[in-house]
């Protein structure tokens, strides 16, 4: 299975600031996704990170708030901009591994608390 | 929305007992995947069952899928305290590679 590393694993952020989360995969993958998990909730898809083009955002999420980069097939970043306490969540990177029948694997997550 | 629903939302059992949780979904799927999440951590992939499969086993885990009822179940046999976690089902859309998650079941296994 793909090994996914996320940084930072945890951070406390000041209101109004922005933070960039990095996701590194140990192999080339076609599809990468970013999810958000608010406290006590399930996961919600933010966007699909497309290599070489703009990310595809789900309803309720916009590029200005969650800019995403995908410079190559092993790396992506998600920025949470102008943070407010409502952005306190775990943000998870995930990838599709086609060799195992479209199994989707997740990183350990980045737990952000906005104060 | 294709989001699945899970029940029960929470489950408390004694070590050694079996734990069963159910997942329902709304539209056509490519496959259904179950995950475990320990508190505040990432998701660990447990098992994938394809839409043309009815049952799958992995160690102490047994997953069933009934596409006519749009439902799946996860059975953990002979539970251990280390099985304490939240369990999520997620459906992979038939039309693409997006996963949609159920609400999750919080399982507490008491020693």
Image (cartoon, grey):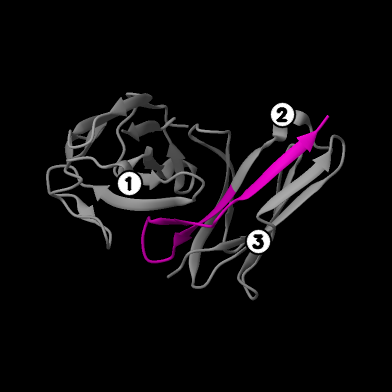
Q: Report the residue at 17% width, 40% height from top.
A: A82
Residue A41 or residue A29, whichever sits in front: A41
Residue A104, percent across and down? 45, 44
Circles 1 and 2 on the same chain:
no
Tag 3 secondary structure: strand
| Image quarter of the C terminus of chain A | top left
- Mark 1 and mark 3: span between their CA atoms? 33 Å
Mark 1 Cα shell of 10 Å, populated few (<14), some (14-19), many (≥20): few
Q: Which residues are magenta?
A: B88-111
Q: Residue at x 12, y 47 (%)?
A: A53
Q: Chain of mark 1?
A: A
**Circle on res. B82:** 2
The chain containing the residue under callout 3 comes to B
Q: Classify residue A28 as left or right of residue A64.
A: right
Q: Which residue is drawn at the image coordinates 76% and 52% (left, top)?
A: B20
Q: Is residue B104 magenta?
A: yes
Q: Quadrant of residue A79?
A: top left
Picture quarter containing residue B109?
A: top right
Of tags 1 and 3, the one toward the viewer is 1
Q: Is residue B89 magenta?
A: yes
Distance of label 2 from label 3 (alpha carbons): 23 Å
Nearest the eye: A71 or A66: A66
Residue A64 on image: x %, y %: 13, 49
Q: Please give the chain letter of the residue carrying mark 2.
A: B
Left or right, A48 with reference to A96 = left
Given residues A7 and A38, the one toward you in this image is A38
Classify 10 Å Cα crowding around label 2: few (below 14), some (14-19), many (20 and above).
few
What residue is disc 1 on? Answer: A86
Q: Position of residue A23 (x, y in %)?
A: 30, 30
Above or below for A7 versus B88: above
Residue under label 3, please give it. B72
Main SS category, magenta section: strand
């Amino acid at each position: 299975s793909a090994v996914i590393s996320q940084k930072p694993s945890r951070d406390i952020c000041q209101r109004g600031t922005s933070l960039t989360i990095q996701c590194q995969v140990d192999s080339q993958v076609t599809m990468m996704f970013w999810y958000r998990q608010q406290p006590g909730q399930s996961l919600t898809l933010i966007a699909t990170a497309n290599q070489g083009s703009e990310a595809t955002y789900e309803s309720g999420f916009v590029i200005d708030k969650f800019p995403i980069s995908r410079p190559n097939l092993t790396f992506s970043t998600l920025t949470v901009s102008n943070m407010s306490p409502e952005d306190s969540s775990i943000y998870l990177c995930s990838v599709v591994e086609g060799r195992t029948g479209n199994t989707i694997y997740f990183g350990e997550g980045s737990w952000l608390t906005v104060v | 929305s294709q989001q699945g629903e899970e029940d029960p939302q929470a489950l408390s059992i004694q070590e050694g007992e079996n734990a069963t949780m159910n997942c329902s979904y709304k539209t056509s799927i490519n496959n259904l995947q179950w995950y475990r999440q320990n508190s505040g951590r990432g998701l660990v992939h447990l098992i994938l069952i394809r839409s043309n499969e009815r049952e799958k086993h992995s160690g102490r885990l047994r997953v069933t899928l009934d596409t006519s009822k749009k439902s799946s179940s996860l059975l953990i046999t002979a539970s251990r305290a280390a099985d304490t976690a939240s369990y999520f089902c997620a459906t992979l859309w038939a039309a693409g590679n997006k996963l949609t998650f159920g609400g999750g079941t919080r399982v507490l296994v008491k020693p």
